[in-house]
Amino acid sequence: MYLSTPTKIAIIDHEKKRTYVLRKEGMPDAVVWNPWDKKAKALPDLGNEDYKTMLCVDSAAIETAIILKPFEEWKGRQELSTVSSSYCSGQLDPRKVLHGFS
């Protein structure tokens, strides 16, 4: 879990020379996860060994819960896109980019 993440998160795939961009609104946090071997076997659309090359990055509201009273409304959105790796070159603040993923 990463708290207070930027509204734009880039996951750079150096091997395939592309970048996955997550844009989010209304959800201040992010979660990075992988199902590992046991849970991967329970997912019908994921092969038993696919977890080894799988990474999931989701927007979330973890630190501060979103609590609605009756008839109140809340909106959040998440947009995922794939761009060439050169797209994000120089556009992201390196202090705010989640590192450690390839």
Image (cartoon, helix red, strand yellow):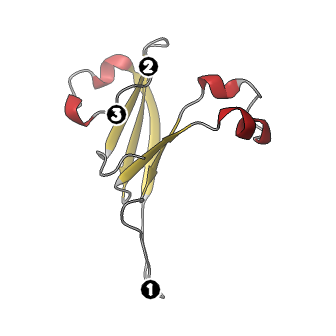
Question: Can you give x and y, in whole percent of width and height, for residue 96 in the image?
Answer: 24, 37
| SS for callout 1 | loop
**In this rendering, position of residue 31 left or right of residue 45:** left
Dividing the picture into quadrants, the one containing residue 47 is top right
In this rendered view, identify the residue nearer to me: 76 or 5: 5
In this picture, is 3 found above or below 102?
Answer: below
**Which residue in the protein does label 1 denote?**
69
N-terminal of the pair, mark 3 or mark 2, is: 2
Instruction: Estimate the x, y position of residue 54 in percent, counting from the top left.
Output: 59, 28
- Going from N to C along the chain, the mark reached first, 1 or 3, is 1
Of pointers 2 and 1, the one earlier in the residue sequence:
2
Amino acid type for the residue under numbered disc 1: Lys
Residue count near mark 3 (Cα–Cα under 10 Å), binned few <14, some 14–19, many ≥20 = some
Asked if residue 93 shows in the view, the reply is no
Q: Which mark is residue 23?
A: none
Tell me the quarter of the picture where residue 46 sits: top right
On screen, residue 101 above or below 64: above
In this rendering, the label closer to the viewer, 1 or 3: 3
Give, as a three-letter code, the residue at label 3. Leu
Is residue 64 shown left or right of residue 44? left
- Closer-to-camera residue (19/40): 40
Provide the residue designation for mark 2: 18
Residue ID at (42%, 66%): 75
Query: Which amino acid type is marked by label 2?
Result: Arg
Please, what secondary structure does the residue beneath circle 2 have?
strand
Residue at point 58%, 36% (across, down) = 34
Q: Label 2 crowding class (10 Å Cα cut-off): few <14, some 14-19, many 20+?
A: some
CA gap between label 3 and label 2 equals 16 Å
Q: Quadrant of the C terminus?
A: top left
> Disc 2 vs disc 1: Cβ atoms closer than 8 Å?
no
Residue beneath disc 3: 98
Query: Where does the image place residue 64, in percent across and percent down from the top left?
Result: 36, 66
